[in-house]
Image (cartoon, helix red, strand yellow):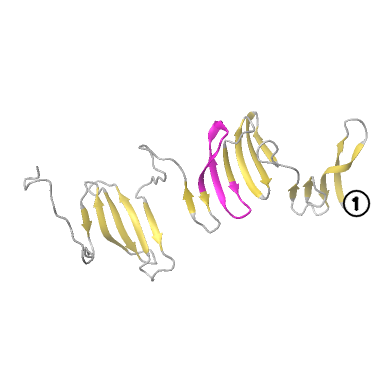
Amino acid sequence: GSANQFFKNSTTAGILTHSSMVELTSGNIGIGITNPDGLLTIKGNSDEVSTPSIRLLDGTDTREVSITNTAGDFVVSTHGTDDAIHGRIKIFESGIIDLDTGGASGTVTNRLRIDSDGAVFFKGTSDGTKGTINLESQDPFIRLYDTNGTADRRKWDIRLIGAGGFEELDFRTINDANNSFISRMQIEYGGDVNISDGNLRVANGHGIDFSATSDASGS
């Protein structure tokens, strides 16, 4: 025939009239479907908690990971030793991507979302030990790039320099070829502000307050 069929055994006697798995001559395999259009196609009433499309176990380890299609959304979840979701990555059919965390409580909270237009939302907590976003590396910096900006004038870096003798937050510009860097302003760890290239401009009608709380001796 055109396919190999693997039938379920009845709990009484005989064979059920529908197959649980088929293999087409093309090599495509279907579980719960007779006309699989992928190398492996799984169809069934699945959900992301108790009946996922695929459940993965690692040897004798009883902790579980699942992969499933939930109403057109792709879901990868960790479950520990129960069905409750401990962590989840969800790609919505609309194109949105969510990263949810929660742990053994079984209640997950969205921490990161990437909208279908590419906008990113960070929703983590912060305290004195960590921020909502944390960059940890040697010479960490954030690059801002206006793709609609003027050539060679559309990139800025906000850079932390922690090396001895510097200890400052540096604002610099970069050309499009990424081989010319000009430091424009620095905020030193001690609080001093340096403008290394350019002038300080104050809008008309405004000024700079030079009032001080100490005398000439600095006390």
Q: Locate the C terminus by quadrant.
A: top left
- Which residue is painted at 63% across and 53% down in the image? 93
Give the answer, above or below, for where 9 lies relative to 22.
Answer: above
The percent position of residue 34, horizontal first and vertical second, equals: 83, 49
Element at badge 1? Answer: loop
Magenta stretch, residue numbers: 90-112
Position of 219 compared to 95: left or right? left
Position of 108 compared to 159: left or right? right
Residue 99 on the magenta span: yes
Q: Residue furthest front?
A: 205
The percent position of residue 81, horizontal first and vertical second, equals: 62, 29
- Which residue is painted at 65% across and 28% down in the image? 60
The percent position of residue 97, horizontal first and vertical second, equals: 56, 50
Give the answer, above or below, for where 204 lies relative to 11.
Answer: below
- Which residue is painted at 67% across and 46% down in the image? 70
Q: Which residue is mark 1?
A: 1
The percent position of residue 119, horizontal first and vertical second, equals: 49, 56
Give the answer, above or below, for where 81 lies relative to 137.
Answer: above
